[in-house]
Amino acid sequence: MEHVRSAPSILHVDLDAFYASVEQLHKPSLRGKPVIVGGVGVRGVVSTASYEARVFGVHSALATGIARRRAPNAAYLIPRFGAYQAYSEVVMGLMHDLSPLVEPLSLDEAFLDIAHLFEPEDVATPEAGSRRAREIAGELRDRIKAATGLTASVGAASSKLVAKIASDAEKPDGLVVVRPGAEQEWLDPLPVRALWGVGPATAERLRKIGATTVAELRTLSRQELVAVLGASYGASLYAIARGMDDRDVSPDRELKSVSVEDTFAEDLLDPATVAAEMDRLVNRLGSRLRKAGRSGRTISIKVRGHDFTTVSRSETAVGPTDDPVVIRAAAHRMLPGAVAAATQAVPGVRLLGVGVSSLAEWAQLDLFAEAEAEAEAEMLDEDDLDPRLWSDDGEGGEGSEEGEAHNAGDADDAHNAGDADGAAVAEELPLDPAHIATPVHTVEGERSPRQFGPLPPGTRGAVESARADRRFLPGQDVEHDEHGPGWVQGSGLGRVTVRFESPWSGPGRIKTLRAEDEALRLVDSAVVARDALERAAAREAPS
Ligand SMILES: [Mg+2]
């Protein structure tokens, strides 16, 4: 095993089920219950599932429709990015207090270099180094918990690669320190799936050639891996299995993605027209990239058919590019397959898009992204699987689509919750899906996961437009003149069901109100989050 550091001085910090955990903190009645955050519409995708929901087989990137079948009684909530941003800032701040070398990968995840906190005696033996790393990581976890109420899983190791795998090893609320010199021993019994960038399809290919664990993977030669997984991924995985990773924590890493897409007034039917439109989009993307001074390694295209079947494909190049020639070549390699998949049932293309994302945008896969992009290509056919990349740059644009009914929270629970006097509780109204529209429409410019995190379709833009139109979406914060703060549990037929509770209250009561009730207002989630964080800080402050 090669490693460049003699102490486990790289931390990988990852908040547990971040979005869902913030929802449970803010909604006392949902603590300990299955909570699913994501797009709630028909084309919605799960962004985060609480651990209680994962038991039912619900996980990120799963279609919300499938999640609803698996966990019908879970609370389905739209993301409240303002709140997540506020929590993320506090957590990132605590990491910056510890080290100037913080490399955020997304809102809830970062690498930290803590080498400066090791005294000579701390690095004298691997055991002393491990003790010191455990102490520092433990204190950081305590501080995060005290300041936010959130749990973080932390991995400490001599490389980013091993630290990242270690943070995942005992999730949630885990702390794993891999002793320097023992990295290989620690990696060997792990399933290949634990390795960075190995998805289900790659794991299956490896299983077929006899490797289900890292130790078994190491018995395969570089040539064997290259033969099965391709040149770049085969070589990467050969190195990963041996823990070979000498990258530094780089705090200034750029995290942007840039994309352009057009919705056409009339469906494109002719392949030549589709190809020409793609060229036009590539040129526009190229000039945007140059203007923004950006380049990226992953090139993606998006095709939406007449019946809204949406197909995304991506390819990852060896180095970052902003060259339209390179992007065009990649786009045209992927285009025929994507068009065929999107127009299987009905001919006609209604939307085309092309985008480039940087290495860091794909932080989950990071430098081995090509691996996943190649090996998991078949999985990228899923409807809007990776909506992160897509933006609307002001031209074209899509309309809202009908969504499905949303009624967050357990229906039984709603019936049982009542006032002591019972009188103030309105009856639960049946929600007719036909009368509830959930917009599935995101409007985002260039995007940084550091800022917003992965965006499922039908979320951020939806929340903002809902506030403007006074439409109530499940999970949104509200305030009522008489009943105080609460959140939307469901809406429809001119009624809104609200659970009146707050991050600092106990579980609250449900009331159903008229949607036009002027005493009821939507509240910015960032304001609620800052209030909750200030109260937590006041509680922690020595009096
Ligand atoms: Mg996380």
Image (spheres, rainbow, N blue to C red):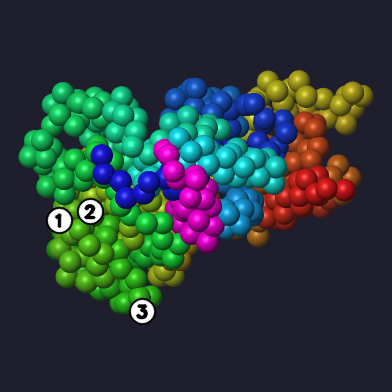
* Residue at horizontal 41 percent and vertical 38 percent from the top: 126
Say which residue label 2 marks.
315
First reached walking from the N terminus: tag 1 or tag 3: 3
Quadrant of the image occupied by residue 286: bottom left
Q: CA distance from mark 2 to mark 1?
A: 9 Å
Label 1, secondary structure: give it: helix
The N terminus sits in image quarter: top left
Farthest-out residue, right: 421
For badge 1, the amino acid type reads Arg
Q: Is residue 120 magenta?
A: yes
* Label 1, ligand 1: CB separation under 8 Å: no
Mark carried by residue 333: 1
Q: Is residue 207 left or right of residue 536?
A: left
Which quadrant of the view contains residue 7? top left
Give the magenta-colored segment's residue range. Answer: 99-126
Q: Identity of the amino acid at label 3?
A: Lys
Q: Position of residue 233 (x, y in %)?
A: 19, 45
CB atoms at circles 2 and 1 under 8 Å apart? yes
* Distance of label 1 from label 3 (alpha carbons): 26 Å
Q: Which amino acid is tagged 2?
A: Glu
SS class of the residue under badge 2? strand
Q: Nearer the viewer, mark 2 or mark 1?
A: 2
In this view of the protein, can residue 526 be seen by the observer? yes
Q: Nearer the viewer, mark 1 or mark 3?
A: 3
